Amino acid sequence: MGRPDEVTPPRGAASVGSASVMPPPSSLQSPTSPQGPSSQPPSQSHGSPGQGLPGQGLPGQGQGFAALPPLQAQSLLAPPPQPLLSPPGQPLQSPPGQPPVAPVQRPQPSMPAPQMPQQAPAAPNPTSPAPARIEWRQTRSDPQDRAVSVLRRKLGKPRVLAFANPKGGVHKTTATVLAAATIGSVRGRGVLAWDDNELRGTLGLRAGSARHARTIRHLVGDLIEIENMHGNDLMQFFDGYLRHASDGSYDVLAGEENPRFAQRLDQSTVRRVMDLLRRTHDVICVDTGNNVESVNWQTVMQSADQLVVTTVPREDAAFTADWMLDVLNETGMEELVANAVTLISCPSPGKLPLLDDLAKHFATRTRAVAVVPYDPALEVGSSIEYGVLQPETKQAWLRAASVMIEPFAE
């Protein structure tokens, strides 16, 4: 016997703590008999405990009901058992003794997937370094670099620059030397300054090292022999008649000091000398004489590719230059005049009253006007050394020389 306070649960009930739970009617299996299933469904009895259904016995007493499997104990606090799952595409595994169960079809959610809220961009940290920015800025070209670029270009063929003004004292010789020195300093070689002044020019004395006393007169005397030479033989033999700048940037063909020699420079001789110089040099700067009626002067103008009108800001010098342009126009050289360059040299420091007026006037008569400043190194009238010029003087001559060469630069 048990204790008086103990209650024995009915058979078939599962004990949970101090309470008992009867299995639900739906969990009972259909009654069977040895003859087969019953045609009458069992009705539920409201009788007292221990009393079976009418005409039938209690389970376990052999009166028409099959024995039921015992129930597993289940806690009320435990979660309900989950359905058995199997891998996708395979049927569920049913418990022993149960018919196979079809796989559970999981319905697809009809609602769209929730969108994650976008986060606002983080505020910049004031302590962190600012991101690097690339800025494109338009750089201005340096006029000096542009002038150097022009002077270094190919010229297509040897070019002759004629520096002219019938008036003396207008810096013709100085302009011829400094133009040759400027162009030669950029190009490196192939530049020559020729003193073709019929009245005892000084270019040979102010430029180049006098290794010898040979002049244009000696060259003309041996012209036939030199013309028949070619290549290195020509260059080596012809070099004996030239003088050279101290820095080697240009060569010098000195003029003859004897005025009588001018009569020998006829048109044919001048052309032959010019052809020889074109064979040996790329740029020939010619210091012309003062006699516009001489055959020599006119032949040089006819052979020139570029006319450079040299003057100073004085009325007499400007008047003579203006008159020379009229003479050239009358002799059929209008194109040479239209493409000419006027070079105004300042003989003294400070503001010169006529400089602006003359620059405006010659701008209407020639292609361009270039102004070069005063430089104390040129005032003494001795040898012209390009290296001792002031920086602003060199820059002005670079621009002036590039204007002279620019029409031919390729």
Image: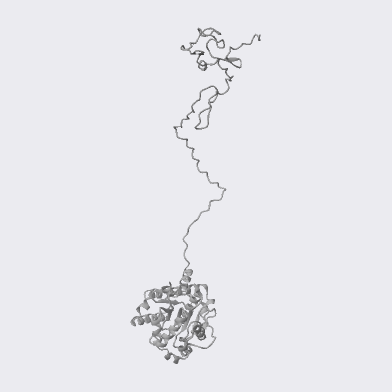
Does any portion of residue 170 appear in the rendered image? no
Q: Is residue 193 left or right of residue 61?
A: left
Q: Nearer the viewer, residue 322 or 162?
A: 162
Q: Nearer the viewer, residue 387 or 321?
A: 387
Q: Nearer the viewer, residue 13 or 175?
A: 13
Give the total number of marks visible in the rendering: 0
258 shown above or below 320: below
Q: Position of residue 215 (x, y in %)?
A: 49, 88
Q: Position of residue 186 (x, y in %)?
A: 50, 74
Dividing the picture into quarters, in which one does residue 227 lie?
Answer: bottom left
Does any portion of residue 405 appear in the rendered image? yes
96 shown above or below 40: below
Q: Residue furthest front?
A: 35
Q: Where's the N terminus, which quadrant?
A: top right
100 shown above or below 209: above
Q: Nearer the viewer, residue 217 or 125?
A: 217
Dividing the picture into quarters, in which one does residue 273 lie?
Answer: bottom left
Q: Residue furthest bottom?
A: 260
Q: How is the image coloured?
A: one colour
Q: Position of residue 46 (x, y in %)?
A: 51, 8
Q: Position of residue 164 (x, y in %)?
A: 42, 81
Q: Where's the C terminus, which quadrant?
A: bottom left
Q: Is residue 343 left or right of residue 209?
A: left
